[in-house]
Image (spheres, rainbow, N blue to C red):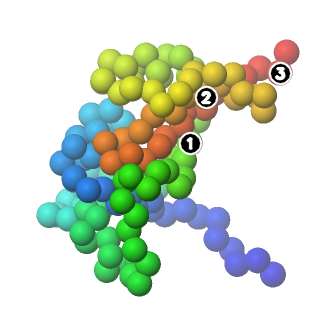
């Protein structure tokens, strides 16, 4: 029998510099701050808490595993469903956000574009394409 793990409560992103990451999620995503201290800032992301945690403080959370440096490359992508990928890309550009790729129509029926936050975490926006 599977372990019932279907209610995502929080995403914790490790960041080397908290201030630019905090500004990014506040200004670009328009998120409301739930909690803040010297090592972290937590935001309300719908039904999930998005927590930004300084790399230096993350070790105690995941130890004995280690925090990978940004240069190691992306190991995940976070996707947000949108109604109009092109309009969202235009709004991201207004905030100075450069796209990693896209927007592009994918063969699996989505129009997607990807961008990274200041710490290198990759986000994707995805719009369902009509099946006409």
Whether 43 is drawn above or below 113: the answer is: below
Q: Which residue is situated farthest in the front direction here? A: 71
> Where residue 113 appears, x then y in whole percent?
55, 28
Instruction: Single out the mark in the foreground, 2 or 3.
Output: 2
- CA gap between label 2 and label 1 equals 9 Å
Query: Badge 2: few (under 14), some or many (20 or more) residues near its Cα, within 10 Å?
Result: many
Which residue appears at 49% of the width and 16% of the height? Answer: 87
Residue 74 x, y percent position in the rendering: 49, 50
Q: Where, by quadrant of the figure, is residue 115 drawn?
A: top left
Q: Which residue is drawn at 40% across and 64% down?
A: 68
- Mark 1, other Cα within 10 Å: few <14 / some 14–19 / many ≥20: some
Q: Name the residue under label 2.
A: 112
Q: Earlier in the sequence, mark 2 or mark 3?
A: 2
Looking at the image, which residue sits at the far bottom?
64
Residue 124 horizontal side relative to residue 130, left or right: left
Instruction: Please tell me whether mark 1 sits on a helix, a strand or a loop.
Output: strand
Residue beneath the point at 31% across and 80% down: 60
Residue at point 72% right, 27% down?
Answer: 106
Q: Position of residue 27 (x, y in %)?
A: 27, 34
Q: Tell me the residue that label 1 is attached to.
A: 79
Pick the quarter of the image with the C terminus.
top right
The answer to whether the residue labelled 2 contacts the one labelled 1, judged by CB atoms less than 8 Å apart, is yes
Cα distance in 3D space between marks 2 and 3: 16 Å
Q: What element carries label 2?
A: strand
Q: In the rendering, at what x and y percent does residue 36 appear?
A: 20, 59
Earlier sequence position, callout 2 versus callout 1: 1
């Amino acid at each position: 029998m599977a372990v019932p793990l279907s209610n995502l409560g929080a995403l914790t992103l490790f960041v080397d510099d908290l201030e630019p990451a905090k500004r990014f999620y506040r200004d670009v995503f328009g998120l409301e701050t739930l909690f803040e201290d010297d090592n972290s800032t937590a935001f309300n992301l719908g039904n999930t808490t998005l927590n930004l945690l300084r790399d230096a403080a993350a070790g105690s959370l995941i130890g004995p595993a280690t925090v990978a440096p940004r240069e190691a490359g992306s190991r995940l992508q976070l996707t947000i469903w949108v109604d109009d990928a092109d309009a969202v890309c235009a709004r991201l550009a207004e905030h100075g956000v450069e796209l990693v790729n896209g927007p592009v129509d994918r063969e699996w029926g989505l129009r997607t574009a990807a961008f990274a936050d200041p710490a290198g975490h990759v986000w994707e926006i995805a719009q369902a394409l009509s099946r006409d």
